[in-house]
Image: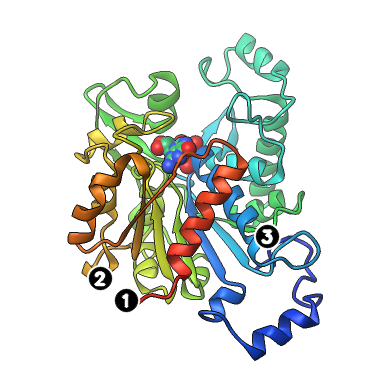
């Protein structure tokens, strides 16, 4: 079920008469401009920052009169980061998204819950359980225990995510990319390891030869994913890690095809600014799959929809303005904008630019 953004449920019914009237009398560029259906593909912390910006921009542009928005926002979250640990199912990217949208994320530390404590983790370490280099906060553990319990009771991962999301009025429909367990593995000279071991324990310093999601060729998109893409006015690629965040989403059979077939415009935001991944170690992931850590290489990796790729437009940073003509010449319309999500205002301005790139009058 699609929740109307704003989470208030009655947004459609309570849309002011005057809005409906002006919609009938004089539409702007398109129906979509009145209150679009927006789908965001996103990973964890970076994706969440952007998505909170999309929600803020939508509330400003298409207000529903109760603090929410008439736009419909759907997030397709990466589940490649998921893992089993001490008998619990963890979904780090889903939870980063959940906590950020709920406003309970720790913005100082940059991940996890605010006001977190680690008493249970200390006990687990004393027992020698789990991974000593992977600390679980007590509040965070609450989510993992709830999730694992519901999974054991027979709920699907999609149902579990909906249940977790129902705790707060997020204003978006949050969907995992798939219900299948397709955890990302990293192939290294030392052998295969879980992505979390490579990323958190080794800080991506063990040279990676590639990434793999065992079983993903048999996975299907979670319920609602292809439906949202088929009904979208706008599809946004968050500036998430192209390899281990958006990579697994697009590798679920059917999702990339649904992006190619969407009636909406598809706009991506570069996670690389001036040759740097801004925060984190995305450059190590890109290097492993032979993509230079530049805004144009990542744009070309996704490719122009007009040439069989995924994007109708690509946003790169002011710092990378010199790359725009080459991208445009390669068939990928490129806009140059400030891409630093320093705070909510900056993230919301960036999201507004991405929405503009999607909704501005255009010819395909
Ligand atoms: P993760 O799953 O928590 O690693 O988060 P994501 O994959 O969703 O996003 C991480 C990526 O976001 C990083 O690799 C950066 O390239 C990108 N990123 C982080 N902060 C910013 C920012 O302020 N602007 C842009 N354009 N990209 C950013
Ligand atoms: Ca992640």
Q: Which mark is residue 364?
A: 1
Neighbours of disc 3 within 10 Å: few (<14), some (14-19), many (20+): many
Q: Check the image and report above or below for 51 versus 271.
A: below
Occupied quadrant, residue 194: top left
State the CA–CA distance, disc 2 to disc 3.
Answer: 31 Å
Residue 114 position in % (x across, y down): 71, 29
Q: Residue at x 58, y 18 (%)?
A: 129
Q: Quadrant of the N terminus?
A: bottom right
Q: Which residue is mark 3?
A: 59
Q: Are marks 1 and 3 in contact (CB under 8 Å)?
A: no
Q: Secondary structure at mark 3?
A: helix
Q: Residue at x 57, y 12 (%)?
A: 128
Q: Nearer the viewer, residue 335 or 167?
A: 335
Query: In front of the other: label 2 or label 3?
Result: 3
Neighbours of disc 1 within 10 Å: few (<14), some (14-19), many (20+): few
Q: Which mark is residue 319?
A: none
Most extreme residue toward the bottom, as rendered? 25
Earlier-in-chain disc, 1 versus 2: 2
Q: Which mark is residue 306?
A: 2
Q: Quadrant of the C terminus?
A: bottom left
Occupied quadrant, residue 292: top left
Earlier-in-chain disc, 2 versus 3: 3
Q: Nearer the viewer, residue 270 or 336?
A: 336
Q: Residue at x 79, y 63 (%)?
A: 8
Residue 26 position in % (x across, y down): 61, 87
């Amino acid at each position: 079920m699609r929740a109307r953004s704003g989470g208030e449920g009655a947004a459609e019914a309570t849309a002011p008469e005057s809005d409906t009237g002006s919609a009938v009398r004089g539409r702007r560029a398109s129906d979509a401009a009145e209150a679009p259906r927006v789908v965001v593909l996103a990973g964890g912390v970076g994706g969440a920052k952007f998505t909170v910006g999309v929600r803020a921009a939508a509330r400003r542009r298409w207000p529903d009169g109760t603090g929410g928005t008439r736009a419909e926002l759907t997030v397709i979250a990466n589940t490649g980061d998921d893992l089993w640990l001490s008998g619990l199912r963890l979904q780090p990217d889903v939870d980063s998204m959940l906590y950020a949208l709920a406003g309970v994320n720790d913005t100082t530390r940059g991940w996890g819950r605010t006001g977190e404590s680690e008493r249970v983790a200390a006990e687990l370490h004393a027992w020698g359980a789990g991974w000593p280099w992977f600390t679980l906060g007590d509040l965070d553990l609450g989510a993992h225990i709830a999730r694992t319990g519901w999974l054991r009771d027979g709920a699907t991962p999609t149902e579990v995510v909906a249940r977790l999301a129902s705790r707060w009025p997020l204003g978006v429909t949050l969907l995992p990319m798939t219900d299948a367990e397709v955890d990302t593995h990293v192939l290294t000279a030392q052998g295969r390891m879980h992505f979390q071991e490579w990323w958190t324990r080794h800080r991506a310093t063990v040279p990676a030869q590639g990434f793999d999601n065992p079983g993903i060729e048999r996975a299907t998109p979670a319920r609602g994913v292809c439906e949202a893409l088929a009904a979208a006015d706008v599809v946004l690629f968050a500036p998430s890690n192209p390899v281990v965040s958006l990579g697994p989403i697009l590798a679920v059979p059917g999702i990339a095809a649904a992006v190619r077939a969407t009636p909406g415009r598809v706009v991506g935001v570069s996670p690389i600014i001036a040759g740097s991944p801004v925060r984190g170690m995305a450059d190590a992931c890109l290097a492993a799959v032979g993509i230079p850590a530049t805004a144009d290489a990542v744009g070309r990796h996704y490719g122009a929809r007009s040439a069989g790729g995924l994007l109708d437009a690509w946003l790169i940073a002011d710092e990378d303005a010199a790359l725009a003509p080459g991208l445009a010449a390669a068939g990928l319309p490129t806009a140059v904008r400030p891409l630093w999500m320093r705070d909510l205002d900056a993230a919301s301005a960036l999201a507004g630019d991405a929405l503009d790139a999607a909704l501005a009058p255009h010819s395909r």
